[in-house]
Amino acid sequence: MEFFDLSGKVAIVTGGNQGIGLAIARGLAAAGATVVIANRRAAEGRQAAESLQKEGLGAAAVPTDVSNISSVAAMVSRVISDFGKIDILVNNAAVIVRGLAEDVLDEDWDRMMNTNLRGLFFCCQLVGKEMIKQQKGKIINVSSVISQLVQSGRSVYAISKAGVSHLTRALAMEWSKYNISVNAISPGLTITSINCEHFAEHPDELEEFVKVIPRGRVGSPSDYAGAAVFLASDASDYVCGQTLLIDGGMALP
């Protein structure tokens, strides 16, 4: 459908080198966008971009550490220089350090907050300034079902993702007047590189999680690509400040 056509659009996907980020990058590119993968490890970013290029999709990579504002500013400047505009921003980059609240170290707190919330905010701010100039743009933040649920050992991660969902509402309120849509996707439990080692070591924990998911399975990175295309497209122009739960029903009980 023409509503979902992203031809001619330029999209940035942070953490787009793997997992959910790569699946979203592939979905946006398949819909016609040129996707810039922004992640810390340059070689992995290039590899991801090349994999999309081999599929006939438009992709590039720019090494970016979202926890470093100067790095984000350099990435935004390069994308504007290379492509002339930024139509879509997907804030997917995130880290998690598991541990009970009484054992959380200050460096663990800083690492998660600096990437998951502070870094996301300044990606929004620096790209948002370009979108304000253009008087148009789509920002998609990747939150988590854990922003709605309480799970032991993930308190700081949950705080950061709850902040993402609320920040999404705040930015939508401020920037809608510039024709900028700010929304979020909230994935459910998904096996990606960020958590596969943990669940390999704790298969009983994974089994317990699956028991409370009405759909009866964990998510796959590709489960979130369609929602990203929708929120990046003209079809979602009247969607404002929402966090779309895509969790197989995990938050229902």
Image: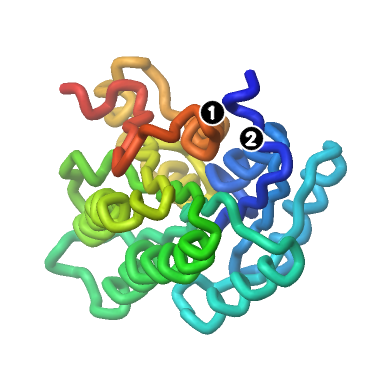
Q: Specify the farthest residue to the bottom.
A: 70
Q: Nearer the viewer, residue 134 or 79?
A: 134
Task: Judge from the rendering whether residue 108 lies leftward or rightward of residue 191; answer left or right.
Answer: left
Secondary structure of the residue carrying numbered label 2 = helix
Task: Judge from the rendering whether residue 132 lies leftward or rightward of residue 23; answer left or right.
Answer: left
User: Is 249 drawn above or below residue 55 in the view shown?
Assistant: above
Residue 226: give its label.
1
Residue 83 falls in which quadrant of the image?
bottom right
State the count of labels.
2
Q: How is the image coloured?
A: rainbow
Residue 242 falls in which quadrant of the image?
top left
Q: Residue at x 16, y 44 (%)?
A: 150
Q: Nearer the viewer, residue 114 or 152?
A: 114
Q: Tell me if residue 82 can be seen.
A: yes
Q: Position of residue 251 (x, y in %)?
A: 22, 29
User: Is 176 drawn above or below residue 207 in the view shown?
Assistant: below
Quick check: marks 2 and 1 in contact, CB under 8 Å?
yes
Secondary structure of the residue carrying numbered label 1 = helix
Residue 24: give its label.
none
Q: Specify the farthest residue to the left.
A: 102
User: Is 62 drawn above or below residue 246 in the view shown?
Assistant: below
C-alpha gap between disc 2 and disc 1: 7 Å
Q: Which residue is mark 2?
A: 27
Task: Judge from the rendering whether residue 234 lies leftward or rightward of residue 49; answer left or right.
Answer: left
Tell me the quadrant of the picture where the N terminus can be found.
top right
User: Is 251 drawn above or below residue 113 in the view shown?
Assistant: above
